[in-house]
Amino acid sequence: MSFQDVKPLLKVEELSHYYGQQLGCRDINFELYPGEVLAIVGESGSGKSTLLNCLSTQINPTMGKAYYRFADGRVENLYEMSEADQRTLLRTDWGFVHQHPRDGLRMGVSAGANVGERLMALGHRHYDNLRSTAIDWLSRVEIDADRVDDAPRTFSGGMQQRLQIARNLVTNPRLVFMDEPTGGLDVSVQARLLDLIRKLVSDLGLSIIIVTHDLAVARLLSHRIMVMKGGEVIEQGLTDQVLDDPHQAYTQLLVSSILQVGT
Amino acid sequence: MTQPILRVSNLTKTFTMHLQNGLHMPVMNDVAFEVFNGECVVLAGPSGVGKSTLLKLIYGNYSADMGDIELRVGDEFINLVDADPRLILDIRRTKIGYVSQFLSAIPRVSALDLVAEVAQNWGHEEAKSLEKAQTMLARLNIPERLWHLPPATFSGGEQQRVNIARGFMGEHEMLLLDEPTASLDAINRKVVLSMIEEKKQAGAAMLGIFHDAETRNAVADREIDVTSFAVAA
């Protein structure tokens, strides 16, 4: 099958969001295909987080549509679904990796329970299976099995972030949203996390929408990039093309502002 | 009559530097040439004339202002200018490979796995892929003690050879070579030359930049003088 026959997982049309009179994001149009990693870059206030929150149905946008294709081929406008259905989607078919692990983890319960919780929400009840699945996922994100009963508050920042990824991926989601997933981490810890994400994405064939202000993260992980400024997408395309041959003044400024490390 | 694998016509590229008051830098104009299977075509001309730019336009790192870059897939020509990003990525997986002298470092992946990964992407089984990767690394004189280490710690020359191993491990019908032999020693340069010769024999087309005149003379079936496309400064 040629890639041209593949239907989009998500199709966003004329999406805009205002906070009262204040513009969040305006007239966003794009398609995301299975297995694609899309990076949304821009500085604080560019509207990238507003867009991510609209796409993940945490905000219902002021205008516009986002059609999602379910595993069974059914296509629905996310904003016409009931809140209950939106929540189910977010807990099963989707994942959301927050910048701060405390927003995505339950810090007081064990690592194993953090991973098992989403499975239980899907109706899995068998304790031994839940535990072995949790341990399997901990090892996939490079956390020792003997930490399974420890609470994430005893983990380092990098480990917490890896745990958050495990918690999200355990239900085999088809689409994962990531909001600055490497944001608060030391550079060496960042590299390890990025490498892990890169590997999981290619092994699992996930679709990812990742918001980052770090162009190096976008270059390493994404196939396509959208550059946002003042609530609008000002440039988009193949990641290396946008970063190597930026056309808009703002994108050129962003690209010229990063330190050249290697090539 | 034989059809070319690559047909470039009327290609124009200008860089607009917004941070320099919108300075327009026309680089090339009306570029037109063809490349056929089984030949190695060398882009000639002094530094700064746009040879690398031309390779990057074909690979899709840069976007053209105007013109066509057509790749033959079967009996059809596909235009890569303004193509869907997914088409470009598909073409890079299946048709056009790019070998530069720089390794884009991926932390924590061993040299052997980096090279074997390419063979696996081309449909070889894991064991076979590892075997092919070992053969390739040995051929390029990467010491066996390094195979299981990530190349980030290697010398410049060793990294370059890992990158060449990756580039030549693929089975792309068209290879873009951006000074793959720069700063290689004589022995390894010879290895790369014989690898280029084998690709040619296998019917691949190559378009490359080689600064060293001796290497250029050894690999080039013909030369294209990029100066003729350059926009006079």
Image (spheres, rainbow, N blue to C red):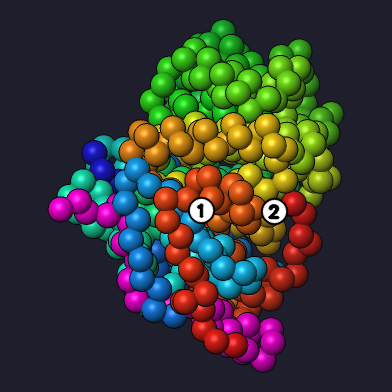
Q: Nearer the viewer, mark 1 or mark 2?
A: 1
**Which residue is at 53% across, 45% downward?**
B218
Residue at the extreme bottom of the image, as rendered: B21
Identify the secondary structure beneath mark 2.
loop
Cα–Cα span, label 1 and label 2? 20 Å
Kindly identify which residue carries mark 1: B208
Query: Residue A130, image x and y in percent?
Result: 55, 15
The label shown at residue A263 is: 2
Question: In the rendered view, does B156 fall on the left or right side of B200?
Answer: right
In which quadrant is the N terminus of chain A drawn?
A: top left
The boundaries of the magenta stretch are B1-28
The label shown at residue A141 is: none
Can residue A165 be seen here?
Answer: no
Query: Residue A149, image x and y in percent?
Result: 74, 17
Tell me the amino acid under the disc marked 1.
Answer: Gly
**Which residue is at 49% across, 38% downward?**
B196
